[in-house]
Amino acid sequence: MTPVLVINSGSSSFKYQLLDMDTASTLASGLVERIGAPDGVASHTVYAQPTDGPAPTFLDATRSRELPIPDHTAGFQVMLDAFASDGPSLTEHAPIAVGHRVVHGGARFFEPTLITPLVEINIDELSVLAPLHNPANLAGIVAAKKAFPDVPHVAVFDTAYHQTLPPAAYTYAIDREVAAAHRIRRYGFHGTSHKFVAEEAAAFLGRPLDELKQIVFHLGNGASVTAVDGGRSVDTSMGFTPLEGLVMGTRSGDIDPAALFHLARRAGMSIDELDDLLNKRSGLLGLAGSNDLRDIQAGIERGDEDARLAFDVYVHRLRAYAGAYLAQLGGADVISFTAGVGENAPLVRAAALETLGFAGVQIDPERNEARARGIRIISTDASTVTVLVVPTDEELEIARQTLSVARP
Protein backbone atom coordinates (compact mmCIF):
# COMPACT_ATOMS: atom_id res chain seq x y z
CA MET A 1 0.00 0.00 0.00
CA THR A 2 1.22 3.51 -0.88
CA PRO A 3 -0.85 6.07 1.06
CA VAL A 4 -0.71 9.74 0.09
CA LEU A 5 -2.60 12.49 1.91
CA VAL A 6 -3.92 15.37 -0.20
CA ILE A 7 -4.77 18.72 1.39
CA ASN A 8 -6.82 21.55 -0.13
CA SER A 9 -6.76 24.39 2.37
CA GLY A 10 -8.94 27.50 2.40
CA SER A 11 -9.00 30.45 4.76
CA SER A 12 -11.65 28.98 7.08
CA SER A 13 -11.72 25.34 6.01
CA PHE A 14 -9.72 22.54 4.49
CA LYS A 15 -10.54 19.33 2.65
CA TYR A 16 -8.43 16.21 2.88
CA GLN A 17 -8.28 12.85 1.19
CA LEU A 18 -6.15 9.81 1.95
CA LEU A 19 -5.52 7.70 -1.15
CA ASP A 20 -3.87 4.35 -1.71
CA MET A 21 -1.88 4.96 -4.86
CA ASP A 22 -1.37 1.24 -5.50
CA THR A 23 -5.06 0.98 -6.40
CA ALA A 24 -5.86 4.69 -6.93
CA SER A 25 -8.63 4.26 -4.35
CA THR A 26 -9.80 6.59 -1.60
CA LEU A 27 -9.31 5.33 1.95
CA ALA A 28 -10.88 8.33 3.68
CA SER A 29 -11.83 11.92 3.08
CA GLY A 30 -13.05 14.80 5.15
CA LEU A 31 -13.84 18.46 5.56
CA VAL A 32 -12.94 20.72 8.46
CA GLU A 33 -14.81 24.02 8.24
CA ARG A 34 -15.68 27.18 10.16
CA ILE A 35 -12.08 27.40 11.37
CA GLY A 36 -11.78 30.35 13.76
CA ALA A 37 -15.41 30.10 14.83
CA PRO A 38 -16.70 28.61 18.10
CA ASP A 39 -19.05 26.31 16.19
CA GLY A 40 -16.63 24.56 13.88
CA VAL A 41 -17.73 21.50 11.95
CA ALA A 42 -15.70 18.45 10.95
CA SER A 43 -16.86 15.50 8.87
CA HIS A 44 -14.88 12.34 8.17
CA THR A 45 -15.79 9.61 5.70
CA VAL A 46 -14.22 6.15 5.62
CA TYR A 47 -14.48 4.04 2.47
CA ALA A 48 -14.57 0.25 2.37
CA GLN A 49 -11.88 -1.14 0.14
CA PRO A 50 -11.97 -3.81 -2.57
CA THR A 51 -10.34 -7.10 -1.69
CA ASP A 52 -9.79 -8.46 -5.19
CA GLY A 53 -7.88 -5.73 -6.95
CA PRO A 54 -8.66 -2.20 -8.14
CA ALA A 55 -12.36 -1.32 -8.11
CA PRO A 56 -14.50 1.67 -7.28
CA THR A 57 -14.62 2.27 -3.54
CA PHE A 58 -17.97 2.47 -1.83
CA LEU A 59 -19.21 4.48 1.11
CA ASP A 60 -18.75 2.73 4.45
CA ALA A 61 -19.34 5.37 7.14
CA THR A 62 -19.48 9.13 7.68
CA ARG A 63 -19.36 10.96 10.99
CA SER A 64 -19.75 14.68 11.67
CA ARG A 65 -18.84 16.63 14.78
CA GLU A 66 -19.33 20.19 15.98
CA LEU A 67 -16.63 21.73 18.16
CA PRO A 68 -14.50 24.86 18.43
CA ILE A 69 -11.67 24.94 15.84
CA PRO A 70 -9.60 28.05 16.57
CA ASP A 71 -7.01 27.71 13.79
CA HIS A 72 -5.64 25.39 11.10
CA THR A 73 -3.31 23.63 13.55
CA ALA A 74 -6.29 22.76 15.73
CA GLY A 75 -8.15 21.68 12.60
CA PHE A 76 -5.41 19.21 11.72
CA GLN A 77 -5.59 17.78 15.24
CA VAL A 78 -9.32 17.27 14.71
CA MET A 79 -8.50 15.42 11.48
CA LEU A 80 -5.92 13.25 13.27
CA ASP A 81 -8.44 12.48 16.01
CA ALA A 82 -10.98 11.43 13.35
CA PHE A 83 -8.48 9.02 11.79
CA ALA A 84 -7.67 7.64 15.24
CA SER A 85 -11.29 7.12 16.26
CA ASP A 86 -12.95 6.20 12.97
CA GLY A 87 -10.06 4.93 10.84
CA PRO A 88 -8.25 4.05 8.86
CA SER A 89 -5.35 3.95 11.29
CA LEU A 90 -2.56 6.32 10.30
CA THR A 91 -0.16 3.95 12.01
CA GLU A 92 -1.09 1.17 9.59
CA HIS A 93 -1.74 3.55 6.67
CA ALA A 94 0.87 6.21 7.35
CA PRO A 95 1.11 8.61 4.39
CA ILE A 96 4.47 8.51 2.69
CA ALA A 97 3.92 12.10 1.46
CA VAL A 98 1.47 14.98 1.72
CA GLY A 99 0.37 16.83 -1.41
CA HIS A 100 -0.95 20.38 -1.19
CA ARG A 101 -3.07 22.27 -3.70
CA VAL A 102 -1.63 25.77 -4.12
CA VAL A 103 -3.57 28.12 -6.36
CA HIS A 104 -0.89 30.48 -7.65
CA GLY A 105 2.65 29.63 -8.60
CA GLY A 106 3.20 32.73 -10.73
CA ALA A 107 5.86 32.27 -13.38
CA ARG A 108 8.17 30.59 -10.86
CA PHE A 109 6.63 27.14 -10.42
CA PHE A 110 5.90 24.95 -13.42
CA GLU A 111 5.97 21.48 -11.85
CA PRO A 112 5.17 19.78 -8.51
CA THR A 113 7.67 21.13 -6.00
CA LEU A 114 9.06 19.73 -2.76
CA ILE A 115 8.16 22.28 -0.09
CA THR A 116 11.16 23.88 1.59
CA PRO A 117 11.34 27.06 3.69
CA LEU A 118 12.31 28.93 0.49
CA VAL A 119 9.28 27.55 -1.35
CA GLU A 120 7.06 28.68 1.55
CA ILE A 121 8.54 32.18 1.26
CA ASN A 122 7.79 32.19 -2.47
CA ILE A 123 4.20 31.01 -1.95
CA ASP A 124 3.73 33.79 0.58
CA GLU A 125 5.29 36.39 -1.73
CA LEU A 126 2.99 35.27 -4.56
CA SER A 127 -0.01 36.05 -2.34
CA VAL A 128 -0.07 39.45 -3.98
CA LEU A 129 -1.37 37.65 -7.07
CA ALA A 130 -3.85 35.46 -5.16
CA PRO A 131 -4.65 37.20 -1.87
CA LEU A 132 -7.70 35.04 -1.16
CA HIS A 133 -6.00 31.72 -1.84
CA ASN A 134 -2.23 31.55 -1.34
CA PRO A 135 -2.25 32.68 2.33
CA ALA A 136 -4.86 30.02 3.08
CA ASN A 137 -2.89 27.39 1.15
CA LEU A 138 0.20 28.33 3.13
CA ALA A 139 -1.67 28.10 6.44
CA GLY A 140 -2.59 24.54 5.52
CA ILE A 141 1.01 23.73 4.65
CA VAL A 142 2.32 25.06 7.97
CA ALA A 143 -0.30 23.14 9.97
CA ALA A 144 0.19 19.94 7.97
CA LYS A 145 3.96 20.02 8.49
CA LYS A 146 3.35 20.16 12.24
CA ALA A 147 1.00 17.19 12.00
CA PHE A 148 3.26 15.20 9.67
CA PRO A 149 6.81 16.43 10.33
CA ASP A 150 8.65 13.36 9.06
CA VAL A 151 7.32 13.00 5.50
CA PRO A 152 7.89 15.12 2.39
CA HIS A 153 5.33 17.79 1.56
CA VAL A 154 4.76 18.74 -2.08
CA ALA A 155 3.07 21.79 -3.59
CA VAL A 156 0.99 21.24 -6.73
CA PHE A 157 0.11 24.55 -8.37
CA ASP A 158 -3.12 25.29 -10.26
CA THR A 159 -1.17 27.54 -12.61
CA ALA A 160 1.72 25.17 -13.33
CA TYR A 161 0.13 23.31 -16.23
CA HIS A 162 -0.31 26.56 -18.12
CA GLN A 163 3.36 27.54 -17.94
CA THR A 164 3.67 26.04 -21.44
CA LEU A 165 1.53 28.84 -22.91
CA PRO A 166 3.46 30.64 -25.66
CA PRO A 167 4.19 34.35 -25.14
CA ALA A 168 1.53 35.30 -27.70
CA ALA A 169 -1.07 33.58 -25.53
CA TYR A 170 0.00 34.83 -22.10
CA THR A 171 0.94 38.42 -22.95
CA TYR A 172 -1.53 41.26 -22.47
CA ALA A 173 -1.18 44.18 -24.88
CA ILE A 174 -0.42 46.83 -22.28
CA ASP A 175 2.73 48.85 -21.61
CA ARG A 176 5.40 46.20 -21.27
CA GLU A 177 7.25 47.97 -18.43
CA VAL A 178 4.09 48.30 -16.37
CA ALA A 179 3.22 44.66 -17.06
CA ALA A 180 6.70 43.48 -16.06
CA ALA A 181 6.83 45.60 -12.90
CA HIS A 182 3.52 44.23 -11.63
CA ARG A 183 3.67 40.73 -13.17
CA ILE A 184 0.58 41.32 -15.28
CA ARG A 185 0.14 38.39 -17.66
CA ARG A 186 -2.20 35.48 -18.20
CA TYR A 187 -1.50 32.60 -15.81
CA GLY A 188 -4.51 30.30 -16.22
CA PHE A 189 -6.09 28.13 -13.52
CA HIS A 190 -7.78 24.74 -13.08
CA GLY A 191 -4.53 23.34 -14.47
CA THR A 192 -4.59 20.20 -12.32
CA SER A 193 -8.01 19.27 -13.68
CA HIS A 194 -7.17 20.11 -17.30
CA LYS A 195 -4.01 18.00 -17.12
CA PHE A 196 -5.84 15.05 -15.56
CA VAL A 197 -8.66 15.12 -18.11
CA ALA A 198 -6.38 15.45 -21.14
CA GLU A 199 -4.29 12.48 -20.01
CA GLU A 200 -7.32 10.37 -19.07
CA ALA A 201 -8.89 11.05 -22.48
CA ALA A 202 -5.76 9.90 -24.31
CA ALA A 203 -5.49 6.76 -22.18
CA PHE A 204 -9.18 5.94 -22.65
CA LEU A 205 -8.87 6.26 -26.42
CA GLY A 206 -5.63 4.30 -26.49
CA ARG A 207 -3.87 7.08 -28.37
CA PRO A 208 -0.52 8.77 -27.64
CA LEU A 209 -1.06 12.01 -25.71
CA ASP A 210 1.57 13.81 -27.76
CA GLU A 211 -0.36 13.17 -30.98
CA LEU A 212 -3.69 14.64 -29.86
CA LYS A 213 -5.18 18.10 -30.21
CA GLN A 214 -7.71 18.50 -27.40
CA ILE A 215 -10.16 21.06 -26.05
CA VAL A 216 -11.08 20.57 -22.39
CA PHE A 217 -14.10 22.30 -20.84
CA HIS A 218 -13.95 22.41 -17.03
CA LEU A 219 -17.46 23.61 -16.22
CA GLY A 220 -18.38 24.03 -12.58
CA ASN A 221 -19.32 27.08 -10.55
CA GLY A 222 -15.93 28.28 -11.73
CA ALA A 223 -15.37 27.46 -15.38
CA SER A 224 -12.52 27.45 -17.87
CA VAL A 225 -11.54 25.91 -21.18
CA THR A 226 -8.07 24.94 -22.34
CA ALA A 227 -6.55 24.13 -25.71
CA VAL A 228 -4.15 21.21 -25.32
CA ASP A 229 -1.70 20.35 -28.08
CA GLY A 230 0.32 17.18 -27.57
CA GLY A 231 -0.37 17.24 -23.82
CA ARG A 232 0.72 20.87 -23.45
CA SER A 233 -1.56 23.76 -22.58
CA VAL A 234 -1.28 26.30 -25.41
CA ASP A 235 -4.24 28.56 -24.57
CA THR A 236 -6.69 28.87 -21.71
CA SER A 237 -9.63 31.10 -20.90
CA MET A 238 -8.74 32.24 -17.37
CA GLY A 239 -6.07 34.89 -17.23
CA PHE A 240 -4.36 37.06 -14.61
CA THR A 241 -7.08 35.87 -12.22
CA PRO A 242 -9.85 33.25 -12.42
CA LEU A 243 -12.27 36.04 -13.42
CA GLU A 244 -11.44 36.12 -17.13
CA GLY A 245 -13.06 33.92 -19.75
CA LEU A 246 -16.28 31.95 -19.57
CA VAL A 247 -19.51 32.99 -17.88
CA MET A 248 -19.49 31.30 -14.47
CA GLY A 249 -21.79 30.82 -11.51
CA THR A 250 -21.10 34.21 -9.94
CA ARG A 251 -18.27 35.60 -12.11
CA SER A 252 -18.76 37.67 -15.23
CA GLY A 253 -15.96 36.25 -17.35
CA ASP A 254 -14.86 38.50 -20.21
CA ILE A 255 -16.03 42.12 -19.99
CA ASP A 256 -14.85 45.38 -21.55
CA PRO A 257 -12.68 46.96 -18.81
CA ALA A 258 -14.02 50.38 -19.83
CA ALA A 259 -17.37 49.30 -18.36
CA LEU A 260 -15.67 49.38 -14.96
CA PHE A 261 -14.31 52.87 -15.57
CA HIS A 262 -17.86 53.93 -16.44
CA LEU A 263 -19.29 52.40 -13.24
CA ALA A 264 -16.59 54.06 -11.17
CA ARG A 265 -17.21 57.46 -12.71
CA ARG A 266 -21.00 57.44 -13.11
CA ALA A 267 -22.15 55.08 -10.35
CA GLY A 268 -19.42 56.01 -7.87
CA MET A 269 -18.48 52.39 -7.32
CA SER A 270 -15.21 51.74 -5.49
CA ILE A 271 -12.58 49.18 -6.45
CA ASP A 272 -13.86 46.83 -3.75
CA GLU A 273 -17.45 47.24 -4.95
CA LEU A 274 -16.44 46.50 -8.53
CA ASP A 275 -14.48 43.45 -7.36
CA ASP A 276 -17.54 42.22 -5.48
CA LEU A 277 -19.81 42.89 -8.48
CA LEU A 278 -17.73 40.93 -10.98
CA ASN A 279 -16.69 38.05 -8.73
CA LYS A 280 -19.74 37.51 -6.51
CA ARG A 281 -22.80 39.12 -8.12
CA SER A 282 -22.36 38.42 -11.82
CA GLY A 283 -22.44 35.39 -14.10
CA LEU A 284 -25.56 33.24 -13.91
CA LEU A 285 -26.42 34.69 -10.50
CA GLY A 286 -26.37 38.24 -11.81
CA LEU A 287 -28.39 37.40 -14.90
CA ALA A 288 -30.99 35.03 -13.47
CA GLY A 289 -30.79 35.13 -9.68
CA SER A 290 -29.17 31.70 -9.25
CA ASN A 291 -25.68 30.34 -9.83
CA ASP A 292 -27.04 26.79 -10.23
CA LEU A 293 -27.65 25.66 -13.80
CA ARG A 294 -30.35 23.30 -12.58
CA ASP A 295 -32.30 26.34 -11.42
CA ILE A 296 -31.66 28.03 -14.76
CA GLN A 297 -33.01 25.02 -16.66
CA ALA A 298 -36.07 24.85 -14.40
CA GLY A 299 -36.63 28.56 -15.06
CA ILE A 300 -36.47 28.01 -18.80
CA GLU A 301 -39.09 25.28 -18.51
CA ARG A 302 -41.34 27.76 -16.66
CA GLY A 303 -40.89 30.33 -19.40
CA ASP A 304 -38.61 32.61 -17.37
CA GLU A 305 -37.03 35.02 -19.88
CA ASP A 306 -34.16 35.93 -17.55
CA ALA A 307 -33.25 32.26 -17.21
CA ARG A 308 -33.37 31.81 -20.99
CA LEU A 309 -31.11 34.82 -21.55
CA ALA A 310 -28.66 33.62 -18.89
CA PHE A 311 -28.42 30.22 -20.56
CA ASP A 312 -28.01 31.76 -24.01
CA VAL A 313 -25.22 34.08 -22.81
CA TYR A 314 -23.51 31.15 -21.07
CA VAL A 315 -23.64 28.99 -24.22
CA HIS A 316 -22.65 31.86 -26.52
CA ARG A 317 -19.37 32.22 -24.60
CA LEU A 318 -18.73 28.46 -24.70
CA ARG A 319 -19.16 28.43 -28.47
CA ALA A 320 -16.93 31.48 -28.88
CA TYR A 321 -14.06 29.81 -27.06
CA ALA A 322 -14.62 26.46 -28.79
CA GLY A 323 -14.33 28.19 -32.16
CA ALA A 324 -11.29 30.19 -31.09
CA TYR A 325 -9.45 27.11 -29.87
CA LEU A 326 -10.31 25.12 -32.97
CA ALA A 327 -8.59 27.92 -34.87
CA GLN A 328 -5.60 28.05 -32.52
CA LEU A 329 -5.11 24.29 -32.69
CA GLY A 330 -5.89 23.95 -36.40
CA GLY A 331 -8.70 21.51 -35.58
CA ALA A 332 -9.27 19.08 -32.73
CA ASP A 333 -9.19 15.33 -32.22
CA VAL A 334 -10.97 15.35 -28.85
CA ILE A 335 -13.31 17.65 -26.95
CA SER A 336 -13.92 16.75 -23.30
CA PHE A 337 -16.36 18.01 -20.68
CA THR A 338 -15.65 17.74 -16.96
CA ALA A 339 -16.61 19.07 -13.50
CA GLY A 340 -20.10 19.48 -12.05
CA VAL A 341 -21.83 21.08 -15.03
CA GLY A 342 -19.68 19.46 -17.69
CA GLU A 343 -20.30 15.97 -16.33
CA ASN A 344 -24.00 16.33 -15.51
CA ALA A 345 -25.65 18.80 -17.90
CA PRO A 346 -26.32 17.19 -21.31
CA LEU A 347 -28.25 20.27 -22.43
CA VAL A 348 -25.15 22.43 -21.97
CA ARG A 349 -22.90 19.97 -23.79
CA ALA A 350 -25.26 19.71 -26.76
CA ALA A 351 -25.82 23.46 -26.99
CA ALA A 352 -22.11 24.28 -26.71
CA LEU A 353 -21.22 22.08 -29.70
CA GLU A 354 -24.40 22.48 -31.73
CA THR A 355 -22.83 24.83 -34.27
CA LEU A 356 -19.56 22.89 -34.73
CA GLY A 357 -20.77 20.54 -37.43
CA PHE A 358 -18.49 22.36 -39.88
CA ALA A 359 -15.54 21.06 -37.83
CA GLY A 360 -16.79 17.47 -37.91
CA VAL A 361 -18.39 17.50 -34.45
CA GLN A 362 -21.50 15.32 -34.15
CA ILE A 363 -23.17 14.66 -30.79
CA ASP A 364 -25.18 11.46 -30.35
CA PRO A 365 -28.35 12.55 -28.47
CA GLU A 366 -28.87 9.20 -26.77
CA ARG A 367 -25.26 8.89 -25.63
CA ASN A 368 -25.28 12.49 -24.44
CA GLU A 369 -28.48 12.05 -22.41
CA ALA A 370 -27.50 8.70 -20.90
CA ARG A 371 -26.95 8.84 -17.15
CA ALA A 372 -23.73 6.94 -16.66
CA ARG A 373 -20.67 7.10 -14.47
CA GLY A 374 -17.12 7.05 -15.65
CA ILE A 375 -15.49 8.29 -18.82
CA ARG A 376 -17.67 7.87 -21.92
CA ILE A 377 -18.06 8.89 -25.56
CA ILE A 378 -21.05 11.10 -26.42
CA SER A 379 -20.26 11.76 -30.08
CA THR A 380 -21.55 9.68 -32.99
CA ASP A 381 -19.43 6.99 -34.61
CA ALA A 382 -19.26 9.20 -37.70
CA SER A 383 -17.98 12.28 -35.84
CA THR A 384 -14.45 13.20 -36.85
CA VAL A 385 -13.95 14.75 -33.40
CA THR A 386 -14.40 12.43 -30.42
CA VAL A 387 -16.45 14.12 -27.70
CA LEU A 388 -16.07 12.74 -24.19
CA VAL A 389 -17.38 13.19 -20.69
CA VAL A 390 -14.42 12.71 -18.36
CA PRO A 391 -15.00 12.83 -14.59
CA THR A 392 -12.20 14.87 -13.09
CA ASP A 393 -10.26 13.80 -10.01
CA GLU A 394 -8.00 16.62 -8.89
CA GLU A 395 -7.08 14.87 -5.64
CA LEU A 396 -5.85 11.81 -7.52
CA GLU A 397 -3.88 14.04 -9.89
CA ILE A 398 -2.32 15.92 -6.96
CA ALA A 399 -1.41 12.59 -5.35
CA ARG A 400 0.17 11.38 -8.61
CA GLN A 401 2.22 14.54 -8.96
CA THR A 402 3.19 14.37 -5.30
CA LEU A 403 4.52 10.85 -5.77
CA SER A 404 6.47 11.91 -8.85
CA VAL A 405 8.79 13.97 -6.66
CA ALA A 406 8.39 12.38 -3.22
CA ARG A 407 8.39 8.62 -3.81
CA PRO A 408 10.98 7.01 -1.48
Image (cartoon, rainbow, N blue to C red):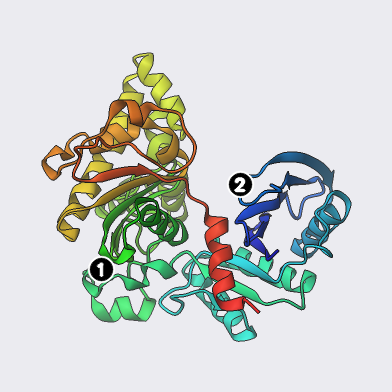
Is 392 or 47 nearer to us in this picture?
A: 47
Quadrant housing residue 355:
top left
Q: Where is residue 43 shown, x and y percent of the image?
A: 76, 45
**Looking at numbered disc 2 in the image, what kind of residue is underneath it?**
Ala
Quarter that holds the N terminus: bottom right
Q: Which mark is residue 287?
A: none
Disc number placed over residue 172 in the picture, else none: 1
Work out whether 236 lies above or below 363: below
Location of the C terminus by quadrant is bottom right
* View extreme (front): residue: 52
Q: Nearer the viewer, residue 404 or 104?
A: 404
* Left or right placement of residue 386 versus residue 357 in this view: right
Q: Which disc number belongs to residue 55?
A: 2
Crowd tier of the residue under label 2, counting other residues whose Cα lies within 10 Å: few below 14, some 14–19, many 20 or above: few
Amino acid type, mark 1: Tyr
Residue 149, image x, y percentages: 77, 76
* Secondary structure at numbered mark 1: loop
Identified at 23% across, 75% down, the residue is 175
Q: Is residue 210 above or below residue 124?
A: above
Q: Earlier in the sequence, mark 2 or mark 1?
A: 2
How far across and how far down the image is residue 164, in percent? 33, 72
Q: Nearer the viewer, residue 315 or 283?
A: 315
Rendered image quadrant of residue 363: top left
Q: Residue furthest bottom?
A: 118
* Callout 2 secondary element: loop
Looking at the image, which is closer to me, 302 or 114? 114
